[in-house]
């Protein structure tokens, strides 16, 4: 099979339809588009592991994620064909038609396009007649692409942080995630035994629930963190008797690294670049929310230290 990145846009959309249906069946028929997107990339070996952090720059200077276009339009086509429904923005649900589908990938895309392509053509013709906008109707439909304009610049800002400042940033993030940080372990660039932070998970009922070790890696998005890095981190967890691990990277994890993180009795939570950006937005860590889905970077990313 042709590598996903070598396919044209319509072939990418056709490829994604079946994995989207299968993954929704796996998780009970409903998911956020963000979770669904990450699960499909993890499952499909023909999709590069670093797909969700490989941003490009458009001719007008806007950072965008090419995968979003194919994924979002695959979702739109499935909705038009009655396989999915969107009860609200960011959520998709399998319909009865989607739940009952048991055909092949090719049969699914053929079935969907017979229904959706005439609808796209009708919208394009209506758009031309109205002459109210010069934007291609297909791009208008992809709201998620416009809503995530802030992600590319934020990822670049993280990549430009020094290793020490990235570690500081990640400690601030996990602190917002109810981790009570130790003031001595993991606060130095050297001599901390392979951890970039250490603390105790807090709960409402108990002061501490578990010891947690933190690792932060600034990696180029073109490279994925491999399983040996997970094994090394697990060794560091052993040294500090950590019961829980959080591994944060600006890149992605290989599928073998994901498997390694789930092996054994102590699960390591993996936070890849895409998930990291979402958490930064959720906790508004060194970013300021300007409108519903746009964030302005604070001067934290501009100062050298």
Image (tube, helix red, strand yellow):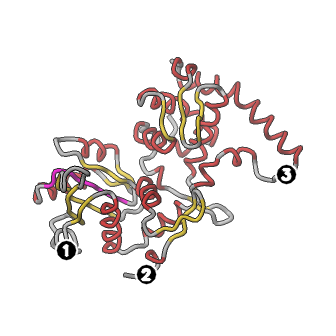
Frontmost residue, 45 versus 136: 136
SS for tag 1?
loop
| Placement of 50 over or under 297, stated as above or below | above
92 shown above or below 194: above
Q: Secondary structure at mark 2?
A: loop
At label 3, counting other C-alpha atoms closer than 10 Å, the crowd grade (few under 14, some 14-19, many 20 or more) is: few
Quadrant of image for the C terminus:
bottom left
Viewer-nearest residue: 206 or 271 = 206
- For label 1, the residue is 190
Percent from the top left, x then y, of residue 100? 52, 17
Tags 3 and 2 touching, CB below 8 Å: no
Instruction: Based on the picture, tell me whether residue 246 belongs to the magenta stretch.
Output: yes
Going 60% across and 31% down the picture, which residue do you hit? 85
In the displayed structure image, the side of residue 214 where residue 235 appears, left or right: left
Q: Residue shown at 35%/53% (left/top)? A: 271
Quarter of the image holding residue 14?
top right
Residue at screen point 53% across, 31% down = 93
Instruction: Let me know if residue 260 is in the magenta part.
Output: no
Instruction: Give the residue furthest to the bottom.
Output: 304
To which residue does mark 2 refer?
Answer: 303
The x and y percentages for residue 144 are 59, 49
Q: Tell which tag, 1 or 3, sits nearer the viewer.
A: 3
Q: Earlier in the sequence, mark 1 or mark 3?
A: 3
Earlier in the chain: of badge 1 and badge 2, it is 1
Give the crowd class for mark 1: few <14, some 14-19, many >=20 residues within 10 Å.
Answer: few
Residue at coordinates 47% horizontally, 30% vertically from top-left? 24
Which segment is the magenta one?
Answer: 242-249
- Residue 81 locus on image (x, y percent): 65, 26
Mark 3–mark 2 Cα distance, whole angstroms, equals 44 Å
Query: What secondary structure is the stretch in magenta mostly built from?
Result: strand
- The local crowd at label 2, few if under 14, some if 14 to 19, many if 20 or more residues have their Cα within 10 Å, is few
Q: Which residue in the structure is indicated by mark 3? A: 132
């Amino acid at each position: 099979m042709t590598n996903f990145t070598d396919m044209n846009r319509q072939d990418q959309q056709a490829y994604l339809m079946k994995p989207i249906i299968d993954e929704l069946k796996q998780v009970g028929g409903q998911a956020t588009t963000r979770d669904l997107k990450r699960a499909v990339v993890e499952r499909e070996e023909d999709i590069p592991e670093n797909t969700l952090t490989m941003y490009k720059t458009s001719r007008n200077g806007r950072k965008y994620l090419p995968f979003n276009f194919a994924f979002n339009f695959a979702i739109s086509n499935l909705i038009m064909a009655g396989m999915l429904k969107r009860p609200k923005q960011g959520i998709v649900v399998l319909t009865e038609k989607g739940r009952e589908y048991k055909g092949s990938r090719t049969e699914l895309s053929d079935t969907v396009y017979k229904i959706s392509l005439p609808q796209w053509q009708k919208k394009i013709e209506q758009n031309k007649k109205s002459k109210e906008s010069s934007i291609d109707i297909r791009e208008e439909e992809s709201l998620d692409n416009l809503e995530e304009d802030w992600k590319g610049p934020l990822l670049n800002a993280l990549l430009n942080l020094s290793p020490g400042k990235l570690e500081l940033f990640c400690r601030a993030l996990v602190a917002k995630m109810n981790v009570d940080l130790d003031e001595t372990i993991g606060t130095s660039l050297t001599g901390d035994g392979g951890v970039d932070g250490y603390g105790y998970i807090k709960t409402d009922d108990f002061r501490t629930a578990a010891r947690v070790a933190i690792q932060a890696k600034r990696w180029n998005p073109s490279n994925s963190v491999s399983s040996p890095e997970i094994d090394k981190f697990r060794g560091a967890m052993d040294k500090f008797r950590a019961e829980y691990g959080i591994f944060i990277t600006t890149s992605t994890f290989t599928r073998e690294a994901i498997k390694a993180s789930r092996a054994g009795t102590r699960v390591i939570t993996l936070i890849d670049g895409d998930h990291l950006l979402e958490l930064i937005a959720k906790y508004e860590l060194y970013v300021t929310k300007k409108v519903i889905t746009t964030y302005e970077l604070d001067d934290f990313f501009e100062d050298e230290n």
